[in-house]
Amino acid sequence: MIVVPTQPHLPHLHNLKSPATEDVTPFRQTTMDSLLREVQQLFEQQLRVDALLALSKKLQAEFKERLRSSPQCMLPSHNYTLPHGKEHGTYLALEVGGSTLRVALVDLYGRHAPTQNLRVRRIVTSTIDNNVRGLRGWAFFDWIAAKIGEMLAADREARDHMQLKEPLPMGIAWSFPIDQTSIRSGNIIGMGKGFHCSTSKGHDLGDLITQACQRLNLNIRLDAIVNDSSAAVLSRAYVDPSTRLAVILGTGLNAAIHLPVSSLHDSKFGARQFPTWVETTHVLVNTELSMFGKTAFPITRWDEYLNANHILPDYQPMEYLIAGGYLGEILRLIIIEAIETAGLFDGRIAPSLLVPYSIDTHTLAMIEADTYPSLSPSCKAFQEKYQLIHSPTPMEMHFIRLVIISISHRSQGYFTAAIYALSTLLDETRQGNAEDDLDHICIGCDGSVINKYPGYMKKSQALLDQLVVTEQDIGRKRIVLESAGESAVLGAGVAVAMANATA
């Protein structure tokens, strides 16, 4: 990462690791106005169109390099084609994440259906808490099977299907590391995140879930395994044939892109046997986008501190600057410095603000969206949530709001540069196929930040349009961001429909 020259590094940040007691800083070294001007300069000076294009070119070089060599990024999936939009039927879809299990029935009606193309007919969400993570042996998969059974029991059509000899086909969006060996199979590498079912390591995911369902007499067959970003591409491409790319931007960050097989080095595919029943000129690639940008992105002293104190420093540099899991922490670090050096909150640090990652993205969104001149709703909510001794003054809350705007603007700018770089990769690798007939490229978007943070997608789209216009002379296609809500379960449903169509 490029560290932007700034003032000395957070002179009082030792207080961030102090016991959770109120601290009073006796000396002021700057003013809130001066600190705000510095924050705005550092966070927004790289957001000019020419700077974003230069940043995009650096990321393009990284993408091309890791398409040839990296074992961690640009990973080819077992999805070679995109949906043609004629797939139809009802499919069972699962989304298994670190904290949530979602079991759904997905109906596909076709791209040209008169009313809706696809829908989640029924969905049940279950929390994966510490008790569930603590399940040992095969008990975690038995728990999943039980949740599947509960959801199916509530749906008459699904109950009727379960009486037939033909099993109900299922797709799964799996968020844990897996050595996938086919669209239907893959050996679990590990679970992490506090899970205790270590005996599952090395076992085939399809077998584990199928056997757990059989123990409950559930007539189910796992036919497709996808990750969340690939699912987003499939769900959006089912509706819009111009889709070649999708991004997940919520707590974390990732993207998937449909590229020619020839753009990846042979080593990326290992000893894989390509299927003969489907065209394999292209492949859906899991970019692991969060891992890029270490040497490309300019960073501030607050970013440097966040990275140095992260459990995995430098592991996901783009995510640390862009994603919702970190925007609030950047704000917290700036607030602490403002308390210590500029007299914010009379120099008093509330114990709650000493807790790392205690400020969430919802708080940022609420304050940025506050249009009251006095920001009274934000003042009241911030005091109550973080237990300040006194409510922030309007001036203090305006300072915080303007800092938030700078943080979110930078996130939007860096996100846009990354998306533009990926779309450029699409342009450079297209091989005289249907993409040449498209006047634009659609990017499916899912995640709480891109879809719910106030103005995030609209502002990112405006930036993308500026970048495209600037490079119109090289024949760039327009890039269109489109929401792809519920993409994990819908994409898993589309994936299993495609697998059944080619079986």
Image: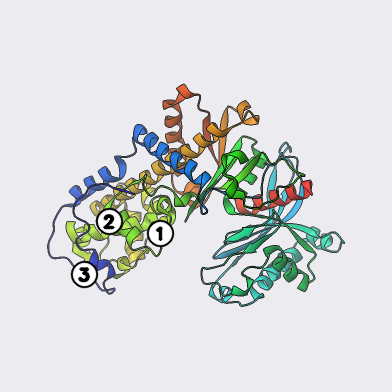
Which numbered disc flags the more N-terminal residue, 2 or 3? 3
Which residue appears at 46% of the width and 51% of the height? Answer: 290
> What is the x, y in percent for residue 145?
70, 69
Q: What is the distance, in whole Å, between disc 2 and disc 1 at their CAs? A: 14 Å
x, y percent for residue 87 = 75, 44
Nearer the viewer's eye, disc 2 or disc 1? 2
The mark that comes first in sequence, 3 or 1, is 3
Name the residue at 20% across, 63% down. Answer: 12
Q: In this view, does 24 lie to the left or right of 293?
A: left
Q: Mark 1 points at which residue?
A: 360
Colour logic? rainbow
Which residue is labeled 2 in the image?
334
Seen in the image, is 393 located left or right of residue 323? left
Q: Are marks 2 and 3 in contact (CB under 8 Å)?
A: no
The amino acid sitting under disc 2 is Ile
At x 52%, y 44%, the residue is 67
Q: Where is residue 263 in the image (x, y as percent from the top left)?
A: 57, 39
The answer to which image quadrant residue 307 occupies is bottom left
Residue 243 seen from this side: yes
**Residue 79 placement, left or right of 68:** right
Q: Tell me the tag on residue 23.
A: 3
Near-viewer residue (40 or 58)? 58
For disc 1, the neighbor class at 10 Å (few under 14, some 14 to 19, many from 20) is some
The crowd level at tag 3 (other Cα within 10 Å; few <14, some 14-19, many 20+) is some
Q: How far apart are marks 2 and 3 (CA)?
A: 16 Å
- The amino acid pointed to by label 3 is Asp
* Left or right relative to 70: residue 349: left
**Is label 3 in a helix, a strand or a loop?**
strand
Label 2 packing within 10 angstroms: few (<14), some (14-19), many (20+):
many
Tags 3 and 1 in contact by the CB under 8 Å rule?
no
The location of residue 164, given as percent across then percent down, is 87, 61
Among the 4 quarters of the image, the one containing residue 112: top right
